[in-house]
Image (cartoon, rainbow, N blue to C red):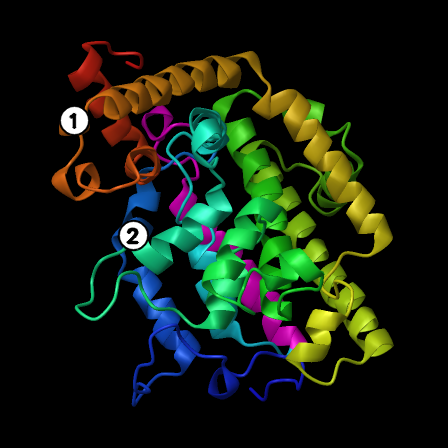
Amino acid sequence: MTLKPYACHANASRGRRFPEPAAPTRSEFQRDRDRIVHSSAFRRLVYKTQVFLNHEGDLFRTRLTHSLEVAQLGRSIGRSLGLDEDLIETVALAHDLGHTPFGHAGQDVLDDCMKAHGGFEHNLQSLRVVDHLEQRYPAFDGLNLTFESREGILKHCARRNAEQLEAREPGGIAQRFLRGGQPSLEAQLCNLADEVAYNAHDIDDGVRSGLLTLEQLESVPLVQHYLRETLAAYPALQGKRLLFETIRRMLSQQVYDIIEASEAALAEHRPCDVDAVRRAPPLIRFTPAMRQASTELKRFLFANLYRHAQVRDTRQRAETVLRDLFAAYLQDRQHLPPDFAEQMDHPRACADYIAGMTDRFALKEHERLTGQRLFA
């Protein structure tokens, strides 16, 4: 497929931090994607929580399956908009590499533990994984990804951290957080595909868990619309097939909505290349009506799923696990593997080690160090 002029073109990439000869059979973005897939951090996502812990059920989403769903949605939309699908897939597969065990509970705990040591941001940690923590190559630390892939991975960044990144890499990926501007369209698309994916699959997992019901979901306009549409087409449908078809129709319409709204924005602003995209307002978007509907769905999920008593109880125990681990590692370097124990910045090494853990490894480590078993 021919890319649009405003797409990122692999042969015009701003390059890698450490120059490498081009691959004979792959584009620069395909090469990035392959490096992500073969990384240790990517494999660990299979045992990292999305909403429900891995041991709570085999069919709940994990960070890995979530990332795959984001990639699928992103590629589908990107194909219609003439964007680079390989870059979209790379960013989608890598965007959660720095996520902690136990979902957002882990992010919040590590940020609190690291308050006096620079804080913790999972987006910045994902960049740290691909820039430093993966150690596979003899010539450099990290995966040495292209600028465009790294730009997409760093979705958010506090100003303090952006200033530090800019000092190390002038004019690099942190510049937009300091001077304003947008990332590439491929990166913008991954941000929105992330939202679409987790809203949809958290409905599925919430109902599967028994914490949500279809009757509750009827109060959400976006779900209600497609539930009624499904029942109009299949009046006798019920149970999981009714749920799956409702979610499928909702996902499809959100995809079509993003394509329609983004095409209108691109026609209005007419970016001639990727630099013009960076100077424009966000161009990958929902229509206003779909933005409102998606926001209402997120509010429902926060109130009824993420803050459900059972989820809160799990979160509290997970927080205890990670706080105890951080305290133990900070107090005694000997509890850490040699590669981490030898680091000059000891608090950051503790955070790096914990952030890289899977849920089940964190639980095993906690039981080893404290003798406690907080989860059955």
Our reading of the magenta stretch's main secondary structure is helix
Is 259 part of what is drawn in magenta?
Answer: no
Q: Is residue 73 left or right of residue 51?
A: right
Mark-to-mark CA distance, 2 and 1: 19 Å
Picture coordinates of residue 97, whole percent (x, y):
39, 49
Q: Secondary structure at mark 2?
A: helix
Query: Could one spot residue 158 in this view of the protein?
Result: no
**Furthest residue to the top?**
372
Above or below, comparing residue 39 to residue 87 in the picture: above
Rate crowding at label 2 as few (under 14), some (14 to 19) or many (20 or more) other CA atoms within 10 Å. Answer: many
The magenta-colored residue range is 52-81
Nearer to the camera, 45 or 60? 45
| Residue 294 shown left or right of residue 241 in the figure | right
What's the residue at 85%, 52% (across, down)?
Answer: 288
**Residue bearing mark 1:** 335
Q: Image quarter for residue 83? A: bottom right
Q: Give percent across and percent down for residue 204.
A: 55, 36
Image-based side of 179 in relation to 261, left or right:
left
Left or right: 18 as drawn, with respect to 331: right
Quarter of the image that includes the N terminus: bottom right
Q: Earlier in the sequence, mark 2 or mark 1?
A: 2
- Name the residue located 73 percent from the left edge and 85 percent from the top edge: 272
Tell me the quarter of the picture where residue 206 sits: top right
- Looking at the image, which is closer to me, 359 or 152? 152
Residue type indicated by callout 1:
His
- Residue named by callout 2: 133
- Image quadrant in which you'd find residue 253: bottom right
Rendered location of residue 196, percent (x, y): 63, 49
Q: Nearer the viewer, residue 216 or 311?
A: 311
Q: The C terminus lies in which quarter of the figure? A: top left
